Image (tube, rainbow, N blue to C red):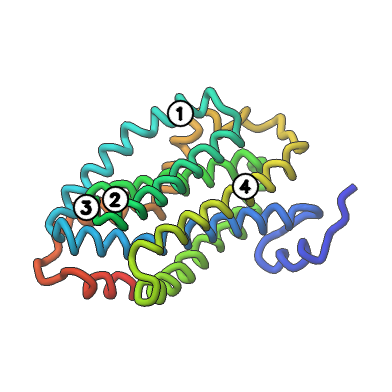
């Protein structure tokens, strides 16, 4: 029988946490915090590359391209997910995006232009990893647990956005553009460690009344994606399309500085 820990009692200040649930909720909150921090670290890199290279007018076209690519990737992700277990899927997708950041870093070091590709890639990064995270959390918890504990986990999103934006501003001025990609890759590596920790911690918990392996279902992934998409980059991409391209005067580092504020 689980005994309520000090962590369980502390988290009860934010949500009704039962005995033994505090650590997993805290780990998932930390995972989301790291994901959002990584996104906000690479966001000014995206702005610097697209504004300093291709120009601001290309953002609307790149945003449309990202939306179209994602429409194709959702069913493809579902097919891949149906053939892999939860842990291999999460590790594989996270490692894929982390390795991409290393590749982009090397391209930048060799003065290879990739602004448009990176703009589209960042949109996919935010959408797919955040949606996958919520699918993972949905798979870990029963419906009743989710109703109680997702409020705690969601705190990680807000804290990650605030912390990531603040850190990104300092890194952009001190480390430069491309080293920020390696920092984001390292954060994704920590995310993988935390995800594995949660997986093995909860592997003995079976929820027979829930849908079987929601994360391994294409329909389940798309359902969770709809819920997660409100806080994803897709919203800002579509806003760019509705507003049109930013004015020509918003270029280079000046625009990046504005994006960090």
Which marked residue is nearer to the observer: mark 4 or mark 3?
3
Circle on res. 195: 4
Q: Residue at x 36, y 45 (%)?
A: 124
Residue 98 seen in the current view: yes
Mark 4 or mark 3, earlier in chain: 3
Label 1: which residue? Answer: 78
* Circle 3 SS class: loop
Q: Nearer the viewer, residue 7 or 41?
A: 41
Q: Nearer the viewer, residue 64 or 256?
A: 256
Label 2: which residue? Answer: 118
Which marked residue is nearer to the observer: mark 1 or mark 3?
3
Q: Residues within 10 Å of mark 4 (few under 14, many from 20)?
A: many
Residue 227 seen in the current view: no
Q: Residue at x 15, y 70 (%)?
A: 250
In three-dimensional space, the C-alpha distance between marks 1 and 3, rounded to whole angstroms, equals 32 Å
In three-dimensional space, the C-alpha distance between marks 4 and 3, rounded to whole angstroms, equals 34 Å
Mark 4 or mark 2, earlier in chain: 2
* Circle 1 SS class: helix
Residue 49 in the image, given as x and y percentages of width and height: 24, 60
Q: Nearer the viewer, residue 239 or 109?
A: 109
Q: Residues within 10 Å of mark 2 (few under 14, many from 20)?
A: many
Q: Residue at x 73, y 56 (%)?
A: 23
Q: Is residue 79 left or right of residue 147?
A: left
Q: Is residue 244 left or right of residue 46?
A: left
Q: Residue furthest left?
A: 248
Residue 72 in the image, given as x and y percentages of width and height: 32, 31
Q: Residue furthest right?
A: 1
In three-dimensional space, the C-alpha distance between marks 3 and 2, rounded to whole angstroms, equals 10 Å
């Amino acid at each position: 029988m689980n005994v309520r820990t000090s962590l369980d009692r502390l988290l009860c200040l934010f949500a009704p946490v039962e005995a033994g649930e505090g650590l997993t909720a805290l780990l998932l909150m930390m995972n989301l915090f790291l994901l959002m921090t990584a996104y906000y670290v690479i966001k000014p890199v995206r702005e610097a590359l697209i504004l300093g290279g291709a120009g601001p007018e290309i953002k609307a076209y790149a945003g449309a391209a990202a939306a179209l690519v994602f429409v194709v990737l959702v069913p493809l992700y579902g097919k891949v997910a149906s053939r892999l277990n939860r842990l291999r899927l999460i590790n594989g997708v996270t490692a894929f995006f982390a390795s991409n950041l290393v590749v982009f870093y090397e391209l930048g070091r060799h003065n290879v232009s990739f602004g448009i590709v990176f703009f589209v890639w960042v949109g996919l990064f935010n959408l797919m990893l955040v949606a996958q995270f919520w699918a993972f959390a949905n798979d870990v918890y029963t419906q009743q647990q989710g109703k109680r504990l997702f409020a705690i986990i969601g705190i990680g999103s807000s804290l990650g956005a605030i912390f990531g934006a603040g850190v990104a501003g300092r890194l952009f001025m001190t480390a430069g553009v491309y080293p920020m990609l390696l920092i984001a890759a390292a954060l994704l590596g920590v995310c993988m460690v935390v995800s594995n920790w949660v997986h093995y911690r909860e592997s003995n918990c079976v929820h027979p009344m829930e849908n079987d392996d929601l994360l391994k279902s294409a329909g389940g992934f798309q359902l969770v994606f709809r819920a997660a998409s409100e806080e994803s980059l897709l919203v800002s991409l579509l806003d760019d399309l509705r507003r049109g391209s930013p004015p020509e005067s918003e270029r280079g580092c000046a625009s990046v500085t504005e994006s960090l504020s």
